[in-house]
Image (cartoon, rainbow, N blue to C red):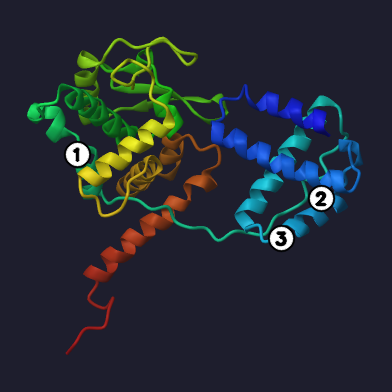
């Protein structure tokens, strides 16, 4: 089993998964290995549905949340699917197992005005009001970064992985590589295009790395920004702009999705823009859209709420 797990993790490293996702797979499969070791099941062929079901129940009794149990079972199921594909197993005995359902929490997001205020927050500095040239440069970069995030609904890893050839500023398009190494072409709004053009004129010479020769978003020294660096800049502009709640990259993606669905009502188009493989993932935004409609209804309908005589 240890050899099969190692081979599977090496396989995942070639699939453009985020470091956090890879680390999650590793942790969950380490749990599987510990449970198997306790029962002397050192070969994947010694696994069966009954033992996996009992381990799932054991992890549940130990206090693991439904969401964590679902993630663990997904990792096990994907490992065994890999083993079947490699010819080490005849069937995937985890396919029929189901973890307890987790309560779905609606993602936090910004309303349209708050989103606009947030993405424009670097402009007061980037406009040249600062006496610090380095701060001007970073604000110029961050204005382009925030505008593009909200304009095109990117994932964090998609934004940090961008290279200048991925952007067609004249045509107003960006090509991103998302989960599963899938590529999609997205529109870029006029505010984001203007901010990107401003940044490109002033950006320092970029340093090539394993993800490309011309990274779009770099430090002042030309090194590609990592995910953590972008998250810290979001925190900075949340504080600087006086946001009511801390804004993180995925919140801006959620806001993009909700605002697009609210305006268009086209769930399939929003699915394509977000790069969701399954439309059920996108459907969470229909709940957010309903909340908006409910608020409009409560305010507008004469019989929506009891009124004082």
In the rendered structure, which disc, 2 or 1, sits on the residue that comes first in sequence?
2
- 268 sits to left or right of 72: left
- 65 sits to left or right of 76: left
In the structure shown, which secondary structural element does the residue marked by tag 2 occupy?
Answer: helix
Q: Residue at x 22, y 19 (%)?
A: 197
- 22 sits to left or right of 130: right
Q: How far apart are labels 1 and 3 at the CA level?
A: 46 Å
Residue 277 figure quarter = top right
Q: Residue at x 54, y 48 (%)?
A: 280
Q: Which numbered circle lies on residue 52?
A: 2
Q: Residue at x 67, y 36 (%)?
A: 26
Residue underneath mark 1? 121
Q: Nearer the viewer, mark 1 or mark 3?
A: 3
Q: Residues within 10 Å of mark 1 (few under 14, many from 20)?
A: many
From the top left corner, tell me how far across and down residue 25 is, in percent.
65, 38
Residue 302 figure quarter = bottom left
Who is closer to the viewer here, 294 or 151? Answer: 151
For the image, the number of numbered tags is 3
């Amino acid at each position: 089993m240890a050899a099969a797990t190692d081979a599977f993790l090496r396989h995942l490293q070639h699939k453009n998964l985020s470091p956090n996702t890879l680390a999650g797979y590793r942790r969950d499969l380490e749990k599987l290995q510990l449970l198997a070791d306790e029962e002397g099941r050192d070969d994947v062929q010694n696994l069966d549905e009954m033992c996996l079901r009992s381990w799932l129940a054991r992890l549940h009794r130990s206090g693991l949340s439904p969401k964590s149990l679902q993630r663990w079972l997904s990792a096990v199921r994907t490992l065994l699917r890999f083993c079947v594909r490699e010819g080490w197993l005849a069937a995937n005995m985890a396919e029929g197992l189901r973890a307890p359902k987790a309560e779905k929490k609606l993602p936090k997001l910004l309303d349209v005005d708050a989103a606009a205020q947030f993405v424009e927050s670097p402009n007061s500095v980037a406009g040249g009001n600062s006496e610090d040239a380095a701060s001007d440069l970073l604000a110029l970069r961050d204005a382009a970064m925030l505008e593009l995030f909200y304009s095109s609904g990117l994932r964090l890893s998609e934004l940090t992985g961008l290279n200048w050839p991925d952007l067609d500023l004249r045509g107003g398009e960006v090509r991103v590589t998302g989960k599963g190494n899938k590529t999609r072409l997205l529109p870029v709004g006029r505010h984001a295009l203007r901010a990107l053009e401003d940044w490109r004129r002033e950006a320092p010479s970029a340093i090539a790395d394993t993800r490309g020769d011309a990274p779009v978003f770099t430090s002042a020294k030309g090194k590609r920004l990592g995910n953590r660096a972008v998250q810290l800049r979001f925190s900075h502009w949340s504080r600087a702009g006086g946001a009511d709640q801390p804004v993180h990259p995925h919140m801006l993606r959620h806001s993009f999705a909700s605002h697009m669905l609210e305006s268009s009502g086209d769930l399939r188009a929003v699915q394509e823009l977000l790069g969701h493989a399954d439309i059920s993932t996108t459907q969470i935004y229909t709940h957010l859209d309903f909340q908006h409609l409910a608020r409009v209804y409560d305010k507008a309908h004469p019989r929506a709420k009891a009124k004082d005589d």
